[in-house]
Amino acid sequence: MRFASTVVRLLVFILPLGMTSVQGEELTEEIVSEMAGKLVEDNVVDGLSVGFLQGDRYGTYHFGRTSRSGRQPNNLTVYELGSISKLFTSLLVADAVVQGKIKLTDTIEADNKAGIKLPSYQGTGISWLDVCVHRSGLPRLPGDYQPASMNDPYRNYNSNEASKFLARHQLARQPGETQEYSNFAVSVLGYMIAELNHSDYETLLRDRIAKPLRMDDCTVTLSDAQKKRFARPHHPVGKGVQVWNFADLPGAGGIRSTLKDMMRFAKATIDPPDGPVGEAIELAWKQHSPADQSGSAMGLGWMIHPDGMTRWHNGETGGSHSIIVVNRELKVAVIVLANTAPGDTVDQLAMELVARTVPSHSPRDQPTEPDPSDANLERLVGRYQLAPTFVFDVSVQGDRVMVGITNQPTQEVFSDSPTMWSYRGVDAKLEFHFRGKGPAYALTLHQNGIKQKAKRIRD
């Protein structure tokens, strides 16, 4: 059972994003087709749609099928967005701030039909900001949650059930203290921001975001016409599964949309339009929570790469997967929507496409690394696990040390010493730990002032 990709808290993106030197590669139909088409050819996904923005250039491409009849996807094919819904929920919070209805630091309070009242810890309540940056202290899912069906697990869990759980739930720590990704908290957030506006979530989404950005198919409940364009979810390939429904709590995973709509959202994110929705987009884009040992820096809903310029979010339901990555400085965005839930493979496609657009240092700019000949490079080779979905895969190609990471392209690292190796173009290092003359038993990732240790695992 999935709600969002479990890698979401630990994904680090060891990519040289934001460097200023040799120009990055231009994305083309040939590049996208080669990389995305392979996912269909290898039976990883049934169908997917890929879009990119790169400066004034853009492209949308479609692969595979969206239904048993063999219908092919297009710009108007409707997909489940999964946890990308959280970006829109956070944007609705930003919109309320722009309108002067709330402050981000206000405790979440609103008269509501379900009687929801969020708990506090030693007098400190949960703020709108706390939930948007996953620091509310609420659990990933409510403790009393019992899925109605494993095929459609959230269809019966509504605001009344949430209210009952929150009335007896005690926070274990102060809100704002630690990042813990919470689908439940954002589901409640969506309900509360709608109640604050005397609306329901779907109507508020349409009036405050979808209409101003001309996102005609960004919705929760599909019309008859939209149902005909819907990409049937699959897991695994070839096996159709149930669409997920979210009662009156769709804010964490219940939005559906098209590539056309998401391209418009990406364009507005890179260059916000005039007016309230543009101001809300700008507020959501800003960093509101720093990185620490518990998680990455965050905007409102957005995960922030250590370069400070790249934002991203992914999502997965029982049979769909989605991801959006945006870099304002490069004026680049990549969106991938798939009607199959293959785990992190779709994320890797989006990241590799973004990586191709990133400038790289010219040879004369490269620092000279120490000669690694005094180190037995084979001692570094192996797999090191930071988390179940975050594994470093270290290999040696000739005299080059290459490191792959779950969801990310393989890159070369360069020797500072026999135990310390650096990436190029991003402030990140890998420190290998040894006992005696055997292979490294662990490595430590040094990045953004944070140290994270990964232990060697068996192949």
Image: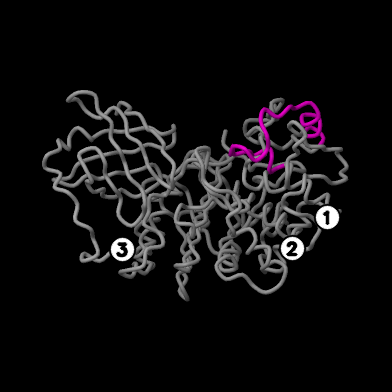
Mark 2 Cα within 10 Å, few/some/many (few <14, many 20+)? some
Q: Quadrant of residue 406?
A: top left
Q: Quadrant of residue 30?
A: bottom left
Q: Residues within 10 Å of mark 3 (few under 14, many from 20)?
A: many
- Residue for badge 3: 360
The residue segment tinted magenta is 160-187
Mark 1 nearby-residue class (10 Å; few <14, some 14–19, many ≥20): few
Q: Earlier in the sequence, mark 3 or mark 2?
A: 2
Look at the picture and state if 336 lies above or below 387: below
CA separation, marks 3 and 2? 38 Å
Counting residues from the start of the chain, the first of labels 3 and 1 encountered is: 1
Residue 157 placed where, x, y %? 74, 34
The numbered mark at residue 197 is: 1
68 to 30, vertically: above or below: above
Direction from residue 187 to residue 203 in the image, left or right: right
Residue 383 has which mark?
none
Inspect the image, locate mark 1, and give the three-letter code of the amino acid beneath it.
Asn
The residue that disc 2 covers is 98
Residue 223 at x, y percent in the picture: 73, 56
Gap between marks 3 and 1, in whole Å?
47 Å
Q: Residue at x 37, y 63 (%)?
A: 19
**Up/down of 260 relative to 111, above or below:** below
